[in-house]
């Protein structure tokens, strides 16, 4: 009871704005900060602080019947999974439980689990890469932890993910452009109906070997700028990687496909403000009268997801603009901004010939060039160049891939295992 009273007090103490920043407000662990070991009242002995994730408690059960790995050329994104998975339970009574790496397999959940009825789920997407010497690298895992983490020690979860990835490192294809996609997921598992904070949760991580997004060369995508549907609105959950944000986009995408477009360009409000492209962040390059190229991305607010690739592009482009790290393909005179952009500005840039590039960014594709946007009965045509993507998109893509694979030494590339020595 003491832990529940403490939890209730902590929840009441949070401001409304703070609750909105907690990524998954309906999962009770969001409202309280745990510690590595349980803390008890020195006078009464009652539990007053819940234990945090502790990587040192990890239990490993190796798969005695490993699966046959398919040829890399046969991989389909998200259809093949490695031999092991990581699971960590949580409850209001005991906090974070024992981490376990065990054979990949079905989860056992009660039919009344809150995840099935009220969409209590959030997830992350990240990748691991393997070099020829066997070194395994993660790309900016701290950013994924920061986006997901309101309840646990992100460094401890990262250490557990490293162990899982190294254990299944043979699943990372050796061919250039291939990687291991990692999916940490947090779900509510309370066995009871009724909308409210979940008393139980499960954090699990699964991995899937994947090939290059553009295996046969870059293919620009075509977007339908939609005013019929809205992906996210102010005060909502669009800025968080919740499962509930993705299912509503399926029907709009299917309707866009019927009209010959690959994805939606999500617009917001009477001004038709640009927000995201499909499930990716958006970048637009426009040349200014003085020859400066402005690279624009919509501001986050609580509408746009703070993508890890988005942040990487912004940091690299700003470093280039400051002269700290020159990136081939990026203009000498570059201005990088996070600001509001409406469709009127985009259409005017096309008409006066100053629209240089439009591309999306995300974990899977890294960058996805756009060559056409359908809007109010006509197509806005965007240059992409003979290679299928513009020089800015290609410059940041090549740099990020180089960092991910270890070809470019950078603090964003985190080694998961000890490199082999001669």
Image (tube, rainbow, N blue to C red):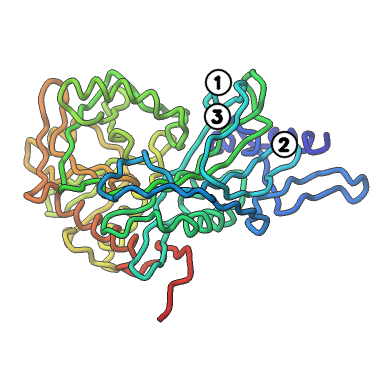
- Comparing 157 with 135, the one in front is 135
As drawn, the residue found furthest toward the right would be 43
Other-residue count near label 2 (Cα within 10 Å), few / some / many at <14 / 14–19 / ≥20 = some
Q: Is residue 310 visible from the viewing direction of this image?
A: no
- Comparing 375 with 68, the one in front is 68
Other-residue count near label 3 (Cα within 10 Å), few / some / many at <14 / 14–19 / ≥20 = many
Q: CA distance from mark 2 to mark 1?
A: 20 Å
Which labelled disc corresponds to residue 92?
2
Q: Which circle's residue, 3 or 2, is located before the other in the chain? A: 2
Residue bearing the label numbered 1: 117
Other-residue count near label 1 (Cα within 10 Å), few / some / many at <14 / 14–19 / ≥20 = some
Residue 342 located left or right of residue 309: left
Percent of width and height locating residue 419? 44, 72
Q: Is residue 410 visible from the viewing direction of this image?
A: yes
Percent of width and height locating residue 280? 32, 39
Q: CA distance from mark 3 to mark 1?
A: 8 Å
Q: Give the answer, above or below, for where 161 lies relative to 341.
A: below
For the point 52% across and 39% down, the residue is 105
């Amino acid at each position: 009871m003491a832990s529940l009273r403490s939890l209730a007090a902590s929840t009441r103490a949070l401001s409304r704005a703070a609750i909105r920043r907690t990524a998954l407000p309906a999962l009770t662990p969001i409202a309280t900060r745990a510690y590595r070991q349980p803390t008890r009242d020195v006078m009464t002995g009652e539990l007053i602080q819940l234990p945090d994730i502790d990587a040192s408690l990890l239990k490993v059960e190796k798969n005695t019947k490993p699966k046959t790995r398919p040829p890399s050329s046969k991989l389909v994104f998200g259809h093949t999974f490695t031999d092991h998975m990581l699971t960590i339970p949580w409850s209001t009574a005991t906090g974070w439980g024992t981490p376990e790496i065990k054979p990949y397999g079905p989860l056992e959940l009660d039919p009344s689990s809150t995840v099935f009825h009220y969409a209590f789920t959030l997830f992350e997407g990240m990748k691991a890469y393997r070099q020829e010497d066997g070194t395994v690298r993660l790309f900016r895992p701290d950013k994924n932890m920061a986006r997901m983490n309101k309840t646990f020690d992100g460094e401890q979860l990262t250490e557990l993910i490293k162990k899982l990835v190294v254990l299944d490192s043979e699943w990372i294809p050796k061919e250039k452009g291939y990687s291991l996609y990692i999916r940490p997921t947090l779900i509510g598992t309370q066995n009871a109906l009724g909308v409210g904070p979940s008393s139980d949760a499960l954090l699990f991580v699964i991995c899937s070997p994947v090939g290059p997004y553009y295996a046969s060369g870059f293919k620009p995508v075509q977007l339908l700028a939609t005013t019929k549907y809205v992906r996210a609105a102010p005060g909502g959950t669009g800025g968080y990687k919740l499962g509930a944000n993705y299912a509503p986009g399926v029907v709009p995408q299917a309707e866009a496909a019927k009209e010959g477009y690959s994805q939606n360009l999500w617009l917001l409000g009477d001004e038709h403000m640009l927000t995201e492209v499909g499930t990716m962040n958006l970048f637009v390059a426009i040349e200014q009268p003085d020859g400066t190229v402005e690279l624009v991305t919509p501001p986050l607010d609580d509408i746009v997801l703070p993508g890890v690739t988005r942040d990487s592009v912004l940091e690299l482009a700003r470093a280039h603009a400051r002269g700290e790290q020159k990136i081939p393909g990026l203009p000498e005179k570059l201005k990088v901004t996070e600001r509001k952009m409406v469709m009127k500005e985009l259409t005017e840039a096309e008409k006066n010939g100053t629209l240089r590039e439009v591309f999306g960014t995300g974990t899977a594709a890294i960058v996805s060039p756009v060559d056409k946007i359908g809007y109010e009965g006509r197509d806005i045509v965007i240059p992409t160049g003979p290679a299928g993507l513009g020089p800015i998109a290609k410059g940041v893509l090549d740099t990020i891939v180089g960092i991910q694979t270890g070809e470019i030494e950078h603090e964003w590339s985190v080694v998961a295992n000890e490199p082999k020595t001669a």
